[in-house]
Amino acid sequence: MNSTRNLPQMLLGQARDILLISLLALGAVCCLLLALGISPADIASTLATGAVGSWLKFNHVLTVWVPLLLCCCGLLFTFRAGLWNIGIEGQVILGAIGTTLLLRADSLGLPPSLLIGLALCAGFISGGLWGGFAGLLKNRGGVNEIFGGLGLNFVAQGFILWLILGPWKREGIASMSGTDLFARELWMYTPPGWRVAPASIVIAICAFLVTWYILSRTRFGLRVKAVGANPAAAPLYSIRPDRTGLAAMILGGGIAGIAGGLQVTCVYHRLLPPISSGYGYLALLVVMLANYKAGPVPIICLLFAALAAGSIQLPITLQLDSSLSGVIQGACVVAALLVYGWRKSRKGGA
Amino acid sequence: MKRIRIMLLTLVAACLLALPWSQAQAADYPFGLLLVGPANDHGWSQAHFEAAQVIEKELTGAKMLYIDKVNPADRPGVTIPMLVDDLVSKGAKLIIANSDDMKDGVREAAMMHPEVKFIHISGDDVLTGKSDKNLSNLMGRMEYGKMMAGFVAAMTSKTGKIAYLGPLVNAETRRLVSSSYLGAHYAWTQVLKKPAADLQFKVSWIGFWFNIPGVTSDPTLVTNSFFDGGYDVVISGIDTTEALVVANQKRKEGKEVFAIPYDYKGACDPAPDACLGVPYFNWVPGYKKMIGEAMTDKWEQNFLWLGPDWADINNMETSSIGFVEGSVMTAEQKAALADFQKALAGGLNLFTGPLNFQDGSAFLAAGATATDEQVWNLPKLLEGMEGAGE
C-alpha cells in the first residue's frame, strides 16, 4: 500500500534528479566552453553526428558500449556487496590474457568458433581469478579492496607488457604495438558493412540480463545486497560477508574478463598493452552516475559510448582535443554525486 | 563611362576570383593523415603534418583532414579502421598512416575500403605481398642522415662515448642505429685516425616511439643516465626531443654535452646551443608523387624508399632526406661533414664488408656491399655496438 502510493513520487523524484544532473553538468560544460571561446552548439552537433551520423558511426558506439556494459555488470555485483572494485582494469587485462592464451593454442585443432567460445570462457575464468585474488587479499590479508585492486592493476599491466615484449612478441620486433594478429578465422564474425560483431552485442545484453536477474531475483543476490547494506548484521541471517564478498568479486571479475576477451577477439584481433582502453575506470563512473542501480546502466553506457565515439570528430572537424568528452563525462558524474549527496542530506535532515 | 569601366572591372575581378575557386571545387581531393604523435611534436609527426600542408598548397584541390595522437595510449579504444571510416565518410580519397604501429590497422582498413588509396609510412607490406593493391609504402633513406649524425657525433665527442636513444627494436631501428654507428666509426677511424677500440657506441631502447608514462622507459631518465655515465653525445632515435632538452639542461650545469635530435627540420630550435644538427625527413617529394598520381588516376601500388638529392640535400622540393647543421658545429666539423657528404654522394657505402654482427657472426665478407634488402631487413646490430639488438 505504502509502496504503491510512493511509486509516482519515486518516479517524479528520479526524473527531477536526472533533470538536475543534466542541467548542472551541461551548465558547467557550457560555461567552460564559452569561457574558452568555443560554441557549445558546435560541440553538441559534432558529437551527435560523430556518434549517430551514420550506421558505421553507430557501430563504433556499440564497439565501446559492449565492453563498457560488461565492466558495469561486473561492478554492479561488487558495489552491491559494498566493495569498491578498483581492480576491474586488471581483471579486464587478465581476461584478455586468458583469451589470448587459448587463441594462441592453435595446436588444439578445434574448430575456430569453438576455440573462440572456449577462449572467452578462459577470459571469464582468468578475470574471475584475478578478482578473487583481490577478494582473498581483503579476507585473508586485511588489504582494503581499493588498494589491493589498484596494486593488482599495476601487476596486470606489468604482466601484459612482459608477455607482449617477451614470450609473445612479434617475430623480430619487441613492440608496444602488441602481439601478432590472430588468424582471420579467430576473429569473431562481423558481417559486411558492420564494425561490431553481433555476437558480442548478444553476449553483453545476456550478461546484463543475468546480472539483473541474479541481483534482484535470487537468494544469492539478496545475500549480496544484505552484505552491502550492513555487513555487521549479515551474520545474524547466517550470511558470511567474507564469502559473499569474495563470490561477488569473482563473478564481477569474470564478467570484466569477458570484456577483455571481446576486446581481443572482436576489436583489436591481437593483445596489446592498453587492451582495457580504460573501460574499467569509465565503468566506475557509469555505475556511480546510475546511483549503483542496474536499470539505468545500459542507457548511461550508451551515452558515454556515444561521447567516446563521437569525440573522434572533435579533432577532425573542430581541431579540438577529443579529451573534451572526458570533461563532459566527469562533469556528469560530479553533478550526479552532488545531486545524490544533496538528496541524502535532505533526507537525513528531514 | 566611368560606371561602365567600374562594372567591367568588377566583372573581370569576379571572374578571376571565381576561376580558381571553381577549379578547386571540380578537383576537390580530400586526403586523410593519421599521425601517431601530436602534430606539433617537433619530430616525426610534425614533419608529416607540415609536408601535408605543403601538398595542400602545391596540389590544387588537395585538402588535408588530419587526426593526431593516433595511438592506443592517447586514444584508448580507438582503432585505425574506425578512424579510416570517419575520414572516408568525410570524403577522404587517400589516407596516409604515418606509423609502423598502424601496420595491422591500415592493412585491415585497406581491405574494407578498396576504393580508397592508402600510404603506409615505413612499412613493407608491398614487399612482403601482404597488402591489397590500394596500399603503397613510403619511406626515406634515413640511413644516410643517421650516418651523418654518427659522423658529427664522433667528430665532436671528447670521451669517445656516443649513445643512441632508441625507440623499440625492429628492422627499421636496427638499420638506423647501425648506420649511426657506421658513420661514427668512419669519422673516428678514417678522419680522426683514432683506434677503433677507443670508440664506444651504446644503444638503449625505451620501448616505443615516444614516452608513455608508466609503460615505456622514460627517455629523460635514460638520457640523463647516458650523460652521467660519461657519454657526451646522444643521438636520438625517438619521435620527440627529450635528448636535446636534457643535453641543454646539462650544458647549463656546465657539462660539455650535445644531442642530435631526429625527424624534423626544426628539431634543433628549442635548444640550438646543445644541438649538433638534425637528420630529417622531408615527405614532400614522396607525398607529391603518390598523391599526385592518385589525383590523376595514375595510382599504382608502389614501394618508395627515397634518398637525398645529393645536389642539395636540403632542397625541400627534391630531397627526401636532409641534414641541418647545428649552429654549434665548428668550421672544421662543417668542412669534414661536407667532405663526408661528397664521399657518400660519390658512392661511398659504409655497409661494406668486412662487417660482423654483434654476436660475432659474419654479415658481409671483405669488399662485399649490402643489398637494399639486407639493409632494410637488418636482423642484428653490428659488431662494436653495445645494447640489445633483438
Image (cartoon, rainbow, N blue to C red):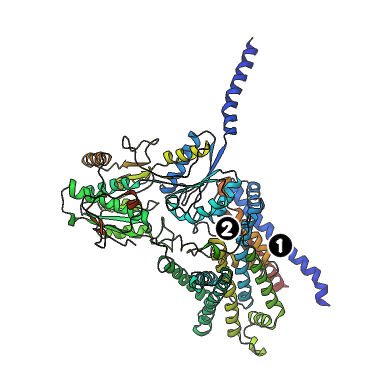
Q: Is residue B86 above or below residue A73?
A: above
Q: Quadrant of the N terminus of chain B?
A: top right
For marks 2 and 1 on the same chain, the one whose residue lies earlier in the sequence: 1
Camera sees residue B153? no
The one nearer the camera, B185 or A79, is B185
Q: Is residue B17 above or below residue B311?
A: above
User: Label 2 amino acid?
Assistant: Gly
- In percent of width and height, residue B106 lies at 51, 52
Query: How far apart in space, not on screen, are marks 2 and 1 (Cα)?
Result: 19 Å
Q: Tag 2's secondary structure?
A: helix
- Write the residue at 40% across / 35% down: B317
- In percent of width and height, residue A134 lies at 52, 78
The one nearer the camera, B46 or B321, is B321
* Marker disc for residue A326: 2
- In percent of width and height, residue A114 lies at 58, 72
- Write the residue at 54% across / 56% down: B79
| Marker count (numbered) | 2
* Marker disc for residue A18: 1
